[in-house]
Image: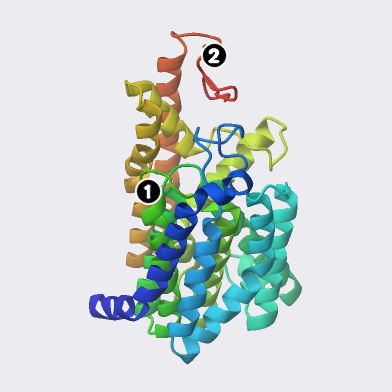
Amino acid sequence: MAPALLDLGSTLWMAGAASLLTALLIVVTRDSHVKWTARGHAGTAIQSAHEIPTPRIGGFAVMVGLGVAAVLLGPDASGLMTLLILSSLPVFLAGMGEDVGLNVSPRIRLAMAGISGILMIALTGHSITRAGVVGLDAVLAIPAISFAFTMFATAGVAHAFNLVDGINGLSKAITISVGVAYTLIALQVGDPALAAVACAMVLVALGVFVVNYPLGRLFLGDAGAYTFGHITAWIAVLLMARHPEISPWAVLLAAFWPVMDTAAAILRRWRKAHPAGEPDRLHFHHIVLRLLRGKLRGRRARARANPLSTAVLSPLFLLPPVLAVLTATDGALALVAFLFCSALYIFVRGSLIRNFRRIARPKRTEPSPSAGANEVVGPAE
């Protein structure tokens, strides 16, 4: 598989280059547009992890890179990429509206993600018809239920990728790791077209990653995050639809981190009777970020903690895609791997929260005057 992967990279490098050059152009022209393109990322949003206004229109670079990839790919893969781009337009535009300050609510963005999913169902004729769960597969054989389940599931994954876009490099690194896993799985089952599409997504994400990490010169934004989530979700659907031998659990395992973190957020807000779309600073990456801020010293502690958080998290979000590749065609092993990763997530997150409370409680019960207006002293759990 390694030679095939290298061959794909050598064919599609221009897609990554287009993404990178567009991202650099946005950064170079920052002063001319930052008053419109940095809304909510200057410490004013509760989930913001930055203090300096920074453009959040990395989605433009993503779409340019994907467009170049559609031109470079062979006929079959180019057709798939074109369908993915066209179907992503509703959620891309909704996300871009939010990125430039039009205040597009999470509910509307999620609805647009659902419409993007409906478009892809209509364009490809594919939907999720199996989940690897006894009884559920029979229910998913009913077309109307399969349609609704696919719409909600793919919209949920798109939303999940947006929720993990909270610190420098994290969402891009997750996209890259999931894309590499899907590329390798597609190569395993002899699907070069789908492998090429997944590889193109990896290179496009890498182009934005280089500009975003570690200094955060450009943010992916809602448009970019939702687009990557939509494309990732539909590569997963197409893998299962085109290759019955692939385990649904392995496909889910590859995208484990954003899905699990979103599920944890929904459960957390449900327990507190908060709206599911209400932002907070209790995602896994926020907890790691705040722990590191408490440990680090010096004037640049906040700036150093941000990219360091992604590095600290990397073993956790890289493990599930690796296991997905290894268990791609073995449903039982994939399920065991998924349960293991779930237990690991719960254990590590719980340990971090307990550690945070030991650090935070003795210090103060009120925010200091120097703390950000939206800074939360301890996890409200």
- Residue occupying the point 50% across, 85% down: 78
Amino acid type of the residue tagged 2 in the rendering:
Pro
Residue 129: mark: none
Task: Look at the picture and state if 158 lies above or below 199.
Answer: above
Helix, strand or loop for disc 2: loop
Q: Nearer the viewer, mark 1 or mark 2?
A: 1
Residue at 36% x, 55% y: name it.
210
Farthest residue to the left: give it. Answer: 3
Tag of residue 367: 2
Q: Nearer the viewer, residue 245 or 190?
A: 190
Q: Is residue 72 above or below residue 315?
A: below
Q: Earlier in the sequence, mark 1 or mark 2?
A: 1
The answer to whether residue 43 is above or below residue 208 is: above
Q: Tell me, for residue 213, which label it has, or none.
A: 1
What kind of colouring is applied to the model shown? rainbow
- Answer left or right for 145 relative to 208: right
> Can you give x and y, in whole percent of width and height, for residue 69 in the image?
46, 77
In this rendering, would 47 be left or right of 142? Answer: left
Residue drawn where x is 42% and y is 32% of the image: 289
Q: Position of residue 277 (x, y in %)?
A: 69, 43
* Residue 359 vs residue 70, the one in the foreground: 70
At 45% from the left and 38% from the top, the residue drawn is: 285
